Image: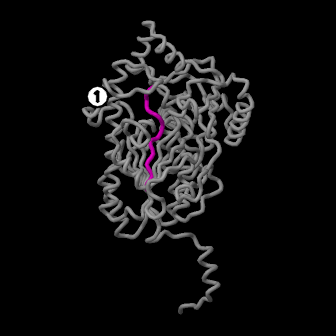
Amino acid sequence: MLRQFSLPLLVLISTLAPITAGAASPNLLFIMADDCTFRDIGCYGGQAHTPNIDRLATQGMRLTRCFQAAPMCSPTRHNIYTGLYPVKSGAYPNHAFAKPGTRSVVHYMKPHGYRIALSGKTHIAPRKIFPFEYSGKKNPDFQAIDALMAQSKAQGKPFCLFACSNEPHSPWDKGDRSRYDPDNVKLPSYFVDTPQTRKQMVAYLAEITYFDGQVGRCLELLEKHGLANNTLVMVVSEQGSGFPFGKWTCYDTGLQSACLARWPGQIEPGTTSDAMVEYVDVLPTFLDAAGVTPPAALDGRSFLPVLRGQRTTHKTHVFGLMTTRGILNGSDHFGIRSVRSKRYKYILNLTPDVPFRNICMKTRVFQSWEARARGGDEDARDKVRRYRHRPAEELYDITADPHEWHNLAGNPKLAEIKSQLKARLGRWMKDQGDLGQQTELEAFKHQARRQNKNKNKAAAN
């Protein structure tokens, strides 16, 4: 026998019941590059040919101040999927794993009717914390994505898909290099101009164009299945490239990211925002878009009001950290922490007496810089020195000095600004449980490959 409910009671029941995704719930598509400096993308003023990304910028919003918390692949991806900063989740070195009990986007969205899939590069652990529907290996599997979208359309069930490329991560061996002339490519001011640098710059730019083709393929599949109008698409560039002064550093070249978002009817086409947002904000933004209240336990905050044009600001400060312990050819310990306001960046190098080192310094590009330095080239000598040796503190006026080349930490006129930023960084580190050098020295305990190696040794004994 069917019971009759009064209208007020029905309203109360609907308010208390969990949100169940239906036909109107938006699909969520997050497309991520790998080691791509944001400045190199066409719509960000770069010389890479990126017609699909540039077109997306005209169809939605281009964010000019998006940042991640760590300039390495594994911490970045844990950061996105958990909505937590790296030390809090435990995934702060590279090749990391999240602490037991950590929850991910799958746990937050699946109960609300979403299929949660990851196609392409993973670099996260353990699987029980990240129980995605997986496909592909290093790059998105477009056949699997095609099937996911077809099933979603047929079943009326929304999806949250992360399409993760491995491009333009080195070695730069994909894409059409003929579009770029080594003699005419523009090199950043912080590069040493050598034939090897120009040759590799061409290879790198070609691979950005290859990634742009992957973005185009994802967008084509949305159109094929008639899903474009009800899908929030977000495209990001991840951390800076593997050239010096990008990846593995807390300069903006390492931490800042391209970020473009399109959602027809929700995001005004052709708009730009300079609101400061972080990768840690992506998960709460997706939850918000799906009609799910983001949990208070997350470090990130939804920037959906920014995307909708309801707000022009989001955060006053963004944070970064770098751990060399456990990276390829890395310094045994060289910890970096940073905080950035709209105008100023403060960087704390925990062990300035230790030379900075990473795998980039084994490349032919960096070796060509060293050869120039040994030959007496003062510009090369200065850049090689700057890359290897860092002072205890760095302070930059990002507005006047976007490449962070003129350290103002010793300027007495900026002493108060430095003090305020240093205090703000200290409060963030305390909140995260970041003990500075002690946290750096404990990095091996948080690396999945070392944990697996130790387990295998124990099993063999």
300 relative to 267, above or below = above
Find out whether residue 138 is within the magenta segment: no
Mark 1 residue type? Asp
189 relative to 65, above or below = above
Query: Can residue 160 be seen from the camera position used here?
Result: no
Query: Can residue 355 be seen from the camera position used here?
Result: yes
- 345 on left or right of 418: left
- 213 on left or right of 22: left
Residue 33: percent from left, percent from top: 41, 42
The residue pinned by badge 1 equals 181
**Colour mapping used in the image:** one colour
Find out whether residue 234 is within the magenta segment: yes
**Magenta span dominant secondary structure:** loop
333 relative to 145, above or below = above
Residue 283: percent from left, percent from top: 54, 53
Residue 5: percent from left, percent from top: 60, 88
Q: Is mark 1 on a helix, strand or loop?
A: loop
Badge 1: residue crowd in 10 Å (few <14, some 14–19, many ≥20)? few
Give the residue at x 64% y 85%: 8
Q: Give the range drawn in magenta.
A: 233-243
Give the residue at x 32% y 26%: 184
**Quarter assignment of residue 161:** bottom left
Q: Which of 318 and 103 is in front in this view?
A: 318
